[in-house]
Image (cartoon, rainbow, N blue to C red):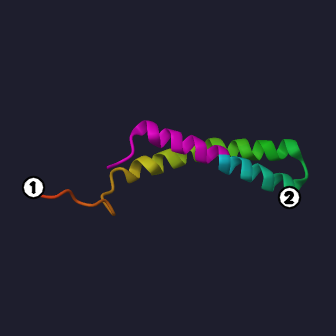
């Protein structure tokens, strides 16, 4: 069973929001500038959102680790 497109989108968005907030917090800790940290977090989130979605959808085409269905069922 593979994830649907809608599920992949939901996972992508939820993960990106979380990860971008972490990136912004780290940027804020390093720079001490809140506005710069938000810009870094936003840019990080937008670019990686598309990258993660493409990565997730590519994995739906890869059969590695997916059990094969039985050849027949009774």
Q: Quadrant of residue 13?
A: top right
For this view, does 14 lie left or right of residue 39? left
Residue neighbourhood size for the residue with mark 1, other residues' Cα within 10 Å, grouped as few (<14), some (14–19), many (≥20):
few
* Overall secondary structure of the magenta section: helix
Q: Position of residue 66 (x, y in %)?
A: 31, 59
**Residue wearing tag 2:** 30
Q: Residue at x 59, y 48 (%)?
A: 15
Q: Residue at x 52, y 44 (%)?
A: 11
* Dot placed on the residue nearer the N-terminal end, 2 or 1: 2
Element type at mark 1: loop
Seen from this angle, which residue lies furthest bottom? Answer: 65
The circle on residue 54 is none
For this view, does 48 lie left or right of residue 34? left
Element type at mark 2: helix
Q: Residue at x 22, y 59 (%)?
A: 68
Q: Residue at x 40, y 50 (%)?
A: 58
Seen from this angle, which residue lies furthest front? Answer: 74
The circle on residue 72 is 1
Query: Are dots 2 and 1 in contact, CB under 8 Å?
Result: no
In the rendered image of this protein, does residue 37 appear above or below residue 72? above
Q: Position of residue 3 (x, y in %)?
A: 39, 45
Q: Position of residue 35 (x, y in %)?
A: 85, 41
Q: Quadrant of residue 65?
A: bottom left
Q: CA distance from mark 2 to mark 1?
A: 59 Å
Instruction: Name the foreground residue: 52 vs 13.
Output: 13
Instruction: Name the foreground residue: 33 vs 18.
Output: 18
Q: Nearer the viewer, mark 2 or mark 1?
A: 1
Q: Position of residue 19 (x, y in %)?
A: 66, 51
For this view, does 47 lie left or right of residue 56? right
Magenta-highlighted residues: 1-17
Residue neighbourhood size for the residue with mark 2, other residues' Cα within 10 Å, grouped as few (<14), some (14–19), many (≥20):
few
Determine if the magenta segment contains residue 16. yes
């Amino acid at each position: 069973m593979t994830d649907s497109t809608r599920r992949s989108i939901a996972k992508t968005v939820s993960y990106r929001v979380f990860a971008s907030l972490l990136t912004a917090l780290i940027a804020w800790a390093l720079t001490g500038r809140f506005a710069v940290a938000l810009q870094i977090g936003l840019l990080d989130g937008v670019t990686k959102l598309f990258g993660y979605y493409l990565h997730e959808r590519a994995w739906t085409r890869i059969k590695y680790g997916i059990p094969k269905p039985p050849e027949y069922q009774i």
